[in-house]
């Protein structure tokens, strides 16, 4: 069914974690390009949850602080998803863009975008 590991061989979730980050970044980029701001927000929220174990407390709090700048009650129901209320559109777009870039910078600093080792499965071990 899956690959068998020899006794004593450590299982490393490095590749699976990097692939999950890649998918989330791909989804975030597609949502941003297509103007699907609520989907973008949801994907960035998932990215934040997945990044949490790798972030220092002050890094995580900077994401929380930026996210708190999202206007309250800024979403309205649309035909197939939630849409930004027109009055909040510019602020929502700015916050999402800044969150996206901030999280990617944290990922870069931690070797989660460009592994520091030849073996990407070792990227999560501290580069």
Image: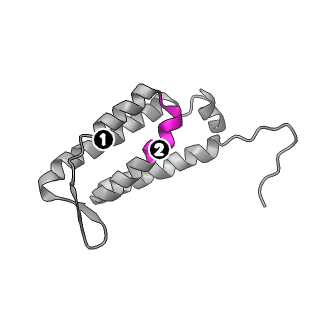
Reply above or below: 79 against 82: below
Whole-percent x, y for residue 28 in the image? 38, 52
Mark sitting on residue 67: 1
Which quadrant of the structure image shows residue 8?
A: top right
Q: Residue at x 34, y 54 (%)?
A: 40
Tell me if label 1 and label 2 are in contact, CB under 8 Å: no
Where in the figure is residue 71, as x and y percent of width and height?
20, 47
Q: Residues within 10 Å of mark 2 (few under 14, many from 20)?
A: few
For the view shown, which residue lies furthest in the right direction? 7
In the displayed structure, 126 sits above or below 5; it is above
Residue 60 visible in the shown view? yes
- Magenta span of residues: 47-56
- Choose between 11 and 69: the one closer to the eye: 69
Check residue 49 in the rendering and tell me which mark sits there, or answer none. 2
Taking the image as shown, residue 55 lies to the left or right of residue 118, namely: left
Look at the magenta stretch and give its main secondary structure.
helix
Instruction: Give residue 15's position: percent from left, percent from top.
Output: 63, 44
């Amino acid at each position: 069914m899956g690959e068998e590991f020899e006794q004593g061989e450590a299982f490393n979730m490095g590749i699976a974690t990097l692939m999950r980050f890649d998918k989330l970044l791909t989804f975030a980029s597609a949502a941003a390009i297509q103007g699907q701001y609520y989907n973008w927000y949801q994907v960035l929220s998932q990215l934040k949850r997945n990044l949490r174990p790798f972030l220092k407390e002050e890094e995580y709090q900077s994401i929380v602080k930026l996210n708190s700048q999202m206007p309250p009650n800024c979403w309205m129901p649309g035909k197939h998803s939630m849409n930004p209320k027109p009055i909040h559109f510019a602020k929502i777009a700015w916050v999402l863009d800044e969150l996206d870039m901030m999280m990617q910078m944290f990922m870069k600093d931690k070797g989660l975008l460009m592994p520091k080792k030849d073996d990407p499965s070792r990227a999560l071990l501290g580069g």
